[in-house]
Image (cartoon, rainbow, N blue to C red):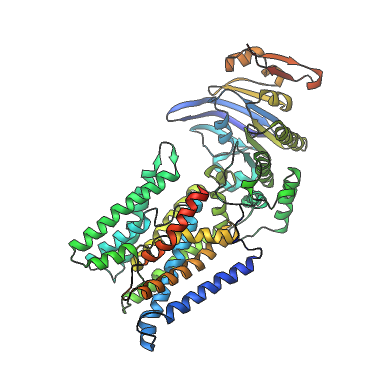
Amino acid sequence: MDSGLKTKNPLLGWLGLVAIFIVAIVVAIVTGPGGLSFNSFFAFRLPRVFIGIVAGGVLGVIGGALQALLRNPLVDPWTLGVASGAALGASLAVILKLNSTIFLPILAFLGAVLAIGIVYSLARGKSGLTVTRLVLAGIIVSFFFSSLVLLLMVSGRRSLGEAVYLMMGHLGVVFTSRSLPLFIVSGLLALAGCLWLLLHARELDIISLSEEAALSLGVNVQFLTRMVFLIGSFTVGLVVAWTGAISFIGLVVPHLVRMMFGPRHSRVLPGSFLLGAGLLLFADAGARNIVPGGLPLSVITALIGVPFFIYLLRTRL
Amino acid sequence: MKAIAVQGLRFGYSNKPLFDQFSLNIEVGEFFGIIGPNGSGKSTLLRLFAGILLPEKGAVELLGQEIRTLSRRKIAQMVGLVPQESFFAFEWKVTEVVMMGRNPFLGLFDRPRQTDIAKVEEAMRLTEVIDFKDRNINSISSGEKQRAVLARALAQEPEILLLDEATSHLDIHHRLKILTILKGLNKKGRTIVFVSHELNDAAAFCSRILLLSGGRCLACDRPEKVITTDLIRQAYGVEPFVFSHPLTGGRPQIILPSE
């Protein structure tokens, strides 16, 4: 079952990932409508790159950690409904005109926690947690919350376009003197969450076997489970507050990294950060350049993600 | 010194007590068998020993220490568990799986040291999985996989080794291989607690056997005192032929009636 992508020399793989990451940053800066000027670089392109790095990186890392925790290759912040929960919280902040305040990330985080709580309790049947129930519950909750986002935004007299961007993702935030510090703090907190997970990479390795195996190998399963869910909804909440819900990055990226480096999370998590950030920047460049005026990000990420999802369905399940 | 001491244990699922006022002592260095029909509480008892389940009432002590006062890491340094079957969602190498056994000894910032690697190699040599240590754990046979999981438990260097029907899915070749490894470990002083449906294996290898039925101890004694026509009938409701033979070292063996 060794895949062809697997590198004999991990160093080569890391060089590849860093190269993708850097090329993606360059592409994100130099391409796009209107050419590159000093003003547009600092006002639009650079913030876009930073948001893209944090969002793609966080989605990749959290996807990898959730897949380990739930021993399930099909989960990520999007399929679990966490992203749509966060989008609901963010839309609430928008219609209450709180979207340049600390309440934006807080509401997004609360929405994410609400979503994961509902999905988890729906999925936990008499026979325990199963793959099918989890993904099904996630999709149902996603649909429901997306409807609520639309309902809230439209009844709050916001444009449909704005609602769609919130449900399907975008990187086009224009920073003001109020929102920039907030973004910096959000970004640093999200990175801190990823770092905590990286420090617990070995325990994530072990919990991916089974709860019982993890307990008998000295892992505090209850604590680790709570922390992964908490950090997952917190960091995804922070990201979605800025970008809206972006599909498939968290699902696809950890798989690709595992194919390169094997399943150890000390490699999967940092690798997923680099690749997630890179892929998201490429997707954003695509979204900006294919259609003038831009597309929601999930349009592009789904075009990449769905074929990969089908491949997973056919080979891994 | 007692490896495991259980005093006045009460435990049940959904308010129905399975064990009540249950007590048991297992000495250090014993090869202790637990047998009994399905649902008699064998696996539950093993999980109580491993601290995976906690008693509602009463005490479980490991090497003289009450299990509730021990951290998960500490328990994992004292007790290794080999389950009936293991599943791996990702493509681990055999050696990576065995290295997980060193987790209880590694801190947050530690990477495996030279001594950890040496212990993992030794465990893999003893269980004869070292020849395929770089193979994917999902690509080897179930007998080899089970030996890899045993190696993982040995890498924990536990004083007490718990096996939950660890040989049930294996052919006689692999079954005997694991039993022989366990016998060798026991000779070096390791305490083995062996839950099995294979009454003949338990009779041949264990120094003492507990026969459970509905959470109660029907007998707990040397094999020839436990594997008897009467007790087996009482526990399982079948009428076996029990015999002992010089080839079995005088240990009792059973044959099931075919009519």
**For residue A216, which quarter of the picture?**
top right
**Could you tell me which residue is drawn at 55 percent across and 72 percent down?**
A18
Quadrant for the C terminus of chain B, please: top right
In this rendering, the answer to whether A65 lies above or below B193 is below
Question: In this rendering, would A196 be left or right of B23?
Answer: left
In this rendering, the answer to whether A82 lies above or below A99 is above
| Percent of width and height locating residue A243 | 35, 68
- Residue A225 visible in the current orientation: yes
Q: How many marks?
A: 0
Quadrant for the N terminus of chain B, please: top right
Question: In this rendering, would A173 be left or right of B207?
Answer: left
Nearer to the camera, A115 or A22: A22
**For residue B229, which quarter of the picture?**
top right
Nearer to the camera, B94 or A303: A303
Nearer to the camera, A163 or A106: A163
For this orientation, the residue located farthest to the right is B246
| Percent of width and height locating residue B232 | 62, 16
**For residue B242, which quarter of the picture?**
top right
- Residue A103 visible in the current orientation: no
For this orientation, the residue located farthest to the bottom is A38
In this rendering, the answer to whether B234 lies above or below A275 is above
| Percent of width and height locating residue B216 | 55, 21
Question: In this rendering, would A18 be left or right of A128?
Answer: right
**Could you tell me which residue is drawn at 63 percent across and 31 percent down?**
B168
| Percent of width and height locating residue A16 | 57, 70
Question: In this rendering, would A149 be left or right of B88?
Answer: left
In this rendering, the answer to whether B207 lies above or below B125 is above
